[in-house]
Image (cartoon, rainbow, N blue to C red):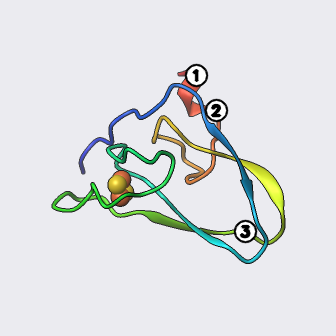
Amino acid sequence: MSTPKRAADTPFPTNVEAGKTYYWCSCGESSKQPFCDGSHQGSDFSPIKYEADKDKKVFFCGCKISTNSPLCDGSHNQ
Ligand code: FES
């Protein structure tokens, strides 16, 4: 399996809205981090869908190696 590009050294705090769907970039190549912009085309990667159950702030993974993706699990500290 390919290794994703480390897009950021810290997560992306994001205010999500109830009922909205978000597509998190798993490859790290998107210029619209933390979201997919289609740059993964031609690679092994595809975006991961995230559906917000309520209005809240979440931390989307920026290092792309979280085991709880699309959310941060602290792996960026490694
Ligand atoms: S651009 Fe990274 S998954 Fe789409």
Looking at the rendered image, the disc whose residue lies closer to the viewer, 2 or 3, is: 3
Residue type at mark 3?
Ala
Query: Where residue 65 sits: x, y (%)?
Result: 46, 40
Q: CA distance from mark 1 to mark 3?
A: 26 Å
Q: Are marks 2 and 3 in contact (CB under 8 Å)?
A: no
Q: CA distance from mark 2 to mark 3?
A: 21 Å
Res 47 quadrant in image: bottom left
Tell which residue pokes out farthest to the top in this image.
Answer: 78
- Compared to residue 60, the image places residue 36 above or below, namely below
Q: First in sequence: mark 1 or mark 3?
A: 3
Which quadrant does ligand 1 occupy?
bottom left
Res 41 quadrant in image: bottom left
Residue 17 left/right relative to 76 = right
How crowded pointer 2 is (Cα within 10 Å; few <14, some 14-19, many 20+) is rated as some
Query: Where residue 11 sits: x, y (%)?
Result: 61, 36
- Compared to residue 8, the image places residue 47 above or below, namely below
Residue at 43 percent of width and 54 percent of height: 25
Tell which residue pokes out farthest to the right in this image.
Answer: 55
- Residue tagged by mark 1? 77
- Residue tagged by mark 3? 52
Q: Is mark 2 within 8 Å of ligand 1?
A: no
Query: Where residue 78 sits: x, y (%)?
Result: 53, 22
Residue type at mark 1?
Asn
Q: Are marks 2 and 1 in contact (CB under 8 Å)?
A: yes
Q: Which mark is residue 74?
A: 2
Residue 64 left/right relative to 4 = right
Looking at the rendered image, the disc whose residue lies closer to the viewer, 1 or 3, is: 3
Q: Is mark 1 within 8 Å of ligand 1?
A: no
